[in-house]
């Protein structure tokens, strides 16, 4: 009985099976290689509500893996200028658009590839903090021939060579709100009126959701690294003068954590601060003159009682607030400012690259690349 029913079902479906077989002979299933290769233009910058609410996304579409001989490109049947095999196009982010390309084949034949291209949801990253994450010391274009150095944002010394930008460029389909600003403290620029967190709140409101990932560098200006260098040049009793500052910095970090919690920002990456004091042997060294007239014992004291203490505080706060702590100690362990393989900008380098000394004592371009690689590996991006 079951065999009879199976036979009847085959007879019922026979016409459909014949049509399907015929279609597959005349129109073979498309080869998956005959599709556009799509990548984002790196990276999208979400600095304003208008950036987020834009009705299009910029994508790079390539058909070069099929052919470099292209006749025409079309978006929704509208011809787009140019015949290169790779094009940067603006695609409607809501419903997507049909992109068609005609490829020139041998003997004048034309192969047409056409598909609806949609803009996927962006992976949104935000950078909050000071000159460490802004990229101070690494202008996009250095100062030369009387021309000023060029930056993504000159007042904040934001650079495309900074680790947040490098990570966003590495991450497919990402958007970056690059809010870090050189000179920022928690009180002044981060939680202040019209500060970085207020800016972030406006972006969250426009997007309708918090960012997927937030990079945070805070504490260095709050503890007063500049004051540390000044004090150790004339006074060996520096630790007593900084005890209250550590209590203050701890409270300031908590204030940032509470604000981020209110905004439902849950995935936060907190970096510790780089060590500029070590030479290629891993020893505290000021012999290159970068620290002025600081004695070696005072420099060792500052490293042990200020920098290491601050980084311990940052790691403890990261654990308290369930943030992801990224330890950069081994990156700079033998590559401080007096090392033969330094990752730290000297005053002379800063003057040459950006025409002022503000970039000195900051990580150089290679350092930011290594930090970016460390974060990518830690987060498995």
Image: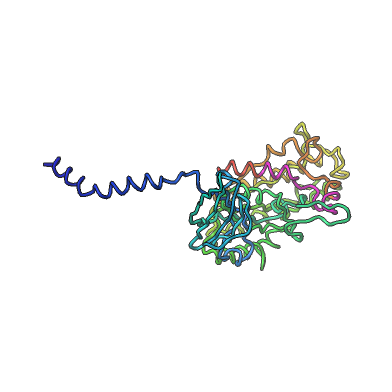
Q: Quadrant of the C terminus?
A: top right
Relative vertical location of residue 119 with respect to residue 171 in this rendering, above or below: below
Apparent side of residue 304 relative to residue 258 in the rendered image (left or right): right
Q: Quadrant of the N terminus?
A: top left
Position in image of residue 107 (x %, y %): 55, 45
Q: Residue at x 63, y 51 (%)?
A: 84
Q: Residue at x 86, y 48 (%)?
A: 234
Q: In the current view of this chain or complex, which residue is farthest to the left?
A: 1
Q: Nearer the viewer, residue 371 or 296?
A: 371
Position in image of residue 18 (x %, y %): 28, 46
Apparent side of residue 166 relative to residue 352 in the rendered image (left or right): left
| Snapshot quadrant of residue 75 | bottom right
What residue span does the magenta drawing correspond to?
351-371
Identify the image's colour scheme: rainbow, by chain, secondary structure or one colour.
rainbow
Q: In the current view of this chain or complex, which residue is farthest to the top?
A: 281
Relative vertical location of residue 121 with respect to residue 229 in this rendering, above or below: below
**Residue 79 included in the magenta stretch of the image:** no
| Snapshot quadrant of residue 45 | bottom right
Q: Residue at x 62, y 62 (%)?
A: 197
- Residue 223 visible in the picture: yes
Position in image of residue 224 (x %, y %): 75, 53
Apparent side of residue 212 relative to residue 219 in the rendered image (left or right): left
Q: Nearer the viewer, residue 129 or 319?
A: 129
């Amino acid at each position: 009985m079951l065999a009879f029913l199976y036979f009847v079902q085959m007879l019922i479906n026979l016409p459909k099976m014949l049509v399907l077989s015929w279609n597959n002979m005349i129109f073979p299933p498309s080869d998956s290689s005959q599709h556009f290769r799509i990548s984002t233009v790196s990276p999208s910058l979400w600095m304003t509500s208008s950036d987020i609410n834009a009705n299009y996304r910029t994508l790079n579409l390539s058909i070069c893996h099929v052919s470099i001989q292209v006749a025409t490109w079309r978006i929704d049947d509208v011809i787009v200028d140019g015949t290169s095999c790779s094009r940067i196009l603006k695609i409607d982010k809501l419903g997507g658009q049909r992109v068609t390309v005609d490829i020139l084949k041998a003997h004048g034949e034309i192969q047409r590839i056409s598909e609806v291209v949609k803009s996927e949801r962006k992976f949104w990253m935000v950078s909050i903090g000071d000159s460490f994450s802004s990229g101070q010391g690494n202008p996009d274009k250095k100062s030369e021939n009387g021309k000023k150095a060029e930056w993504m944002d000159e007042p904040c010394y934001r650079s495309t060579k900074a680790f947040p930008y490098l990570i966003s460029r590495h991450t497919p389909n990402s958007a970056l709100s690059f809010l870090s600003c050189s000179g920022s403290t928690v009180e002044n620029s981060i939680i202040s009126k019209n500060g970085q967190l207020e800016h972030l709140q406006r972006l969250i409101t426009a997007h309708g959701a918090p960012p997927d990932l937030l990079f945070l560098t805070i504490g260095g200006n709050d503890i007063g690294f500049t004051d540390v260098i000044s004090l150790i040049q004339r006074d060996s009793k520096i630790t007593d003068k900084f005890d209250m500052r550590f209590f203050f910095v701890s409270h300031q970090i908590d204030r940032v954590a509470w604000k981020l919690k209110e905004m439902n920002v849950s995935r936060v990456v907190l970096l510790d601060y780089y060590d500029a004091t070590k030479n290629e042997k891993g020893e505290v060294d000021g012999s290159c003159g970068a620290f002025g007239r600081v004695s070696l014992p005072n420099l060792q004291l500052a490293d042990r009682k200020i920098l290491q203490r601050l980084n311990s505080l940052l790691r403890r706060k990261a654990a308290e607030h369930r943030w992801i702590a990224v330890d950069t100690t081994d990156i700079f362990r033998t590559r401080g400012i007096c090392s033969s393989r330094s990752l730290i900008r000297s005053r002379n380098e800063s003057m040459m690259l950006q025409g002022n000394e503000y970039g000195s004592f900051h990580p150089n371009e290679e350092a930011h690349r290594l930090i970016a690689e460390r974060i990518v590996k830690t987060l498995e991006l």
